[in-house]
Amino acid sequence: MAAHTGSPRLAVTPVRLALRAPIQTAWGELRERALLRVVLAWSDGDYGVGEAAPLEPYDGVALGAVAAALQVYASVLRDRAPDDGHAQLLAACAAERDLPQALSAIDLALWDRAGRRAGRPVAELLAADARAAVTVNATVGASDRGAAAAMAAAAARAGFACVKVKVGIGDDAGRVAAVRAAVGPEVAIRVDANGAWATPEEALANLRALAPAGLEYAEEPVHGVEALRAVRAGSPVAIAMDETAAEPGAVASGATDAVCLKIARCGGITGILRDAAAARAVGAAVYVASSFDGPLGIAAGIHAAAALAASGPVAPCGLATLSAFAGDEATPAPSRGAIAVPRGPGLLGAPAP
């Protein structure tokens, strides 16, 4: 990186991460993850790193649209004063193109820079008494009973206190029952439908079939605030909002028992803290998850969740996903069902971009 001073410069690098095995969901099959890594630099020694992680089949946001937004942000940032603060820089970018999946990369880079400059983990900048580790769930993505049971049993042996099972993809009741038998009564089971069911009535019929297994939450059984509200009114299972949280006002609607917060969808760590406050204000529980983000996105989620846990309960977070990638992408990693906050400065605690 050439030396320079003055206004920040933005560099963007495409990255593709292959998955060890395909992930089956209600919205399709995922075989690899395309990301954009960014470096926001004021000089060679004064910089922050971030990550943009749209997932078009899931959130409808194309990687090309995010790349174009980041190109616009690069021009915006070059025109800013060298001493402009975090909020000013984010606002300037949003004023030109308000795309959360792109803004999240800038927000992460700004928080990473702040941690590096302070010589502290980002979580400590967010909350003085941030937790040292975040409880996480294991994801059971297998589509048949035997494989799902084996994955769940392995997660329980590894110390996970919660497993998440993808539903809306076939023999849901059989797989969930097999998972319950494999993990025993003490491990929480969360199911994730990704809006697979078209109506509240269809969702309720499926949830009644799944309920005997004893579930913590059913995540996004249908899409839409009012549809979720209708499901919650008749459901034997507590309901969590995921994709619907992207709708204006949805997080603060009180339509569900819990809200799943994601770095990319919220526009970064700053957006997660904002949306968590709005959800908690109407009595909803919160937790942080990823859509198979890369290491920077996962680290950002860990820092945000650790800070949120300082001010109230946080349900097990969906951040133990890096092991799904082939290659050396598995840090930060879980141990006994929790991920420790990286202890060095910035997001990953590493000195290099």
Image: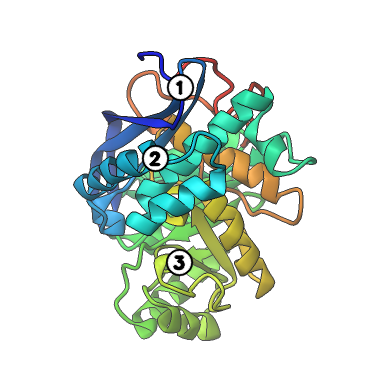
- Looking at the rendered structure, the kind of residue marked 1 is Thr
The C terminus - image quarter? top left
72 on left or right of 193: left
Report the residue marked by disc 3: 245
Report the residue marked by disc 1: 5
Location of residue 35 with respect to 208 vertically, above or below: above
Asked whether the viewer can see residue 226, the reply is yes
Local SS, label 3: helix
Badge 3 or badge 1: first in the primary sequence:
1
Local SS, label 1: loop
Badge 1 or badge 2: first in the primary sequence:
1
Location of residue 194 with respect to 230 vertically, above or below: above
Relative image position of residue 44 (x, y in whole percent): 46, 15
Residue 77 has which mark? 2
- Residue found at x 29% / y 77%: 198
- Looking at the rendered structure, the kind of residue marked 3 is Ala
Q: Residues within 10 Å of mark 3 (few under 14, many from 20)?
A: many
